[in-house]
Image (spheres, rainbow, N blue to C red):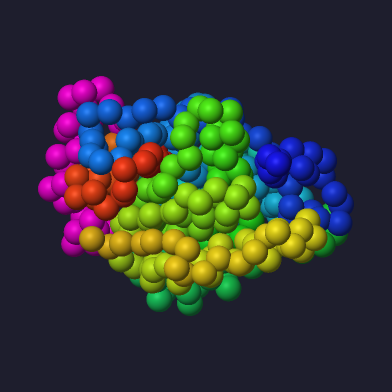
Amino acid sequence: MKTPLLHERFPTHDPDWPFFRHLPLGERPTPVGRLSGLADGAAEVWIKDESGFGDLWGGNKVRKLEWVIAAALGRRSPTILTFGALGTNHGLATARFARAHGIHVALALVDQPLDEHVLLRSEQLEASGATIHRTRTKARTHLLAPWLILRHGRFVGGRFRPAYVLPTGGSSPVGMLGYVECGLEIAAQVDAGELPEPSHVVLPVGSGGTAAGLALGLRLAGLRTRVTGIVVNDRLPLDARRIAEMANRTARLLRRRTGDIRVTDLRPEDVTTTRDWLGAGYGHPTPEAERIIRDSRTIGGPELEPVYTAKALAALRDMNARGDLGDGAVLYLHTHGPR
Ligand SMILES: Cc1ncc(COP(=O)(O)O)c(C=O)c1O
């Protein structure tokens, strides 16, 4: 039996669950298709393209924000406080979408290697209307967080509402619901014959929420597809155990909300993560990533950037050339960080 999408299952807002809501921000389902000429090998490569979500932003941030912004509105929070590095895609997407729904965003930003892209992002962040706190290091961010939560609170309807805290990358249990939904959407596309059931889905792992939510969604839908996460961030402990733990926090939320015992926990053995394509660290270029950016441009393939998507697709290319992904179908999730 087809598993319904979460937003179909919970179409109306339940006042008893103010933080379990959905606010549609983009067109669904996102398209799937064959991806030829970039990562050919024993397995047939398919792409699910998460880039096209409208004018404010594209990419994987939007699905998380559909649940996060709805939750902040449900809690009547005046401000979302979130975290990232200087060139944060997540911070900019949050600032733009939240503002469009009347919520202010405050950002606590740590340093990262500066390049043209990071400088441009910083300018865009300034222009987004978000309040920016350059906390520089993780330690200082932790120290300042309690003050920031109060500093960005406000009295609303006679009650003090502190800032709504959204962890790095939007990867809270609520934010991850967006990628549970994506897993269910992939299953519906397999059911509809739009793509074969993939043996693996390969994607970049920055804070882990996309991979964790997706693994849970695929499991809920009954697919055997294995999430293979390409770790691009060395600042967080992003191994399979951590991804499974994150997925299970969302599983607990879903069990509480739905009373559905089919929402079972994931084990670390259920997902794969690798740091083999990370290079010198978060935001540092690698030759494989640079090569696949050029190759994709040459053949008119997906628009890749060096921090996330190029590292993930380069990994898929190498693994497929070695035969590590079997000889079935493999899906590349194009999380898209617009340049
Ligand atoms: C383009 C892109 N892909 C992947 C990711 C990583 O997603 P997650 O933080 O859920 O692991 C990000 C996060 O910023 C991103 O911008």
At 70% from the left edge and 41% from the top edge, which residue is drawn?
Answer: 1
Residue 21: tell me if it is visible: yes
Q: Is residue 188 left or right of residue 13?
A: left
Residue 83, how many percent across, how many down?
47, 59
Residue 271, how many percent across, how many down?
44, 61
Question: Which quadrant holds the C terminus?
Answer: top left
Q: Residue furthest front?
A: 327
Residue 229, how many percent across, how many down?
38, 56
Q: How many marks?
A: 0
At 34% from the left edge and 67% from the top edge, which residue is drawn?
Answer: 235
Quarter of image, res 103: top right
Taking the magenta stretch, the answer to whether it contains residue 321 is no
Q: For this rendering, which residue is in front, 52 or 10?
A: 10
Q: Is residue 312 left or right of residue 221?
A: left
Q: On screen, 314 above or below 261?
A: above
Q: For this rendering, which residue is in front, 249 or 145?
A: 249
Residue 106: tell me if it is visible: no
Taking the magenta stretch, the answer to whether it contains residue 300 is yes
At 55% from the left edge and 32% from the top edge, which residue is drawn?
Answer: 189
At 25% from the left edge and 45% from the top edge, which residue is drawn?
Answer: 320
Q: On screen, 201 above or below 232?
A: above
Q: Residue furthest top?
A: 300
Q: On screen, 91 above or below 58?
A: below
Q: Tell me which segment is drawn in magenta.
A: 277-303
Residue 302, how many percent across, how many down?
32, 30
Quarter of image, res 182: top right
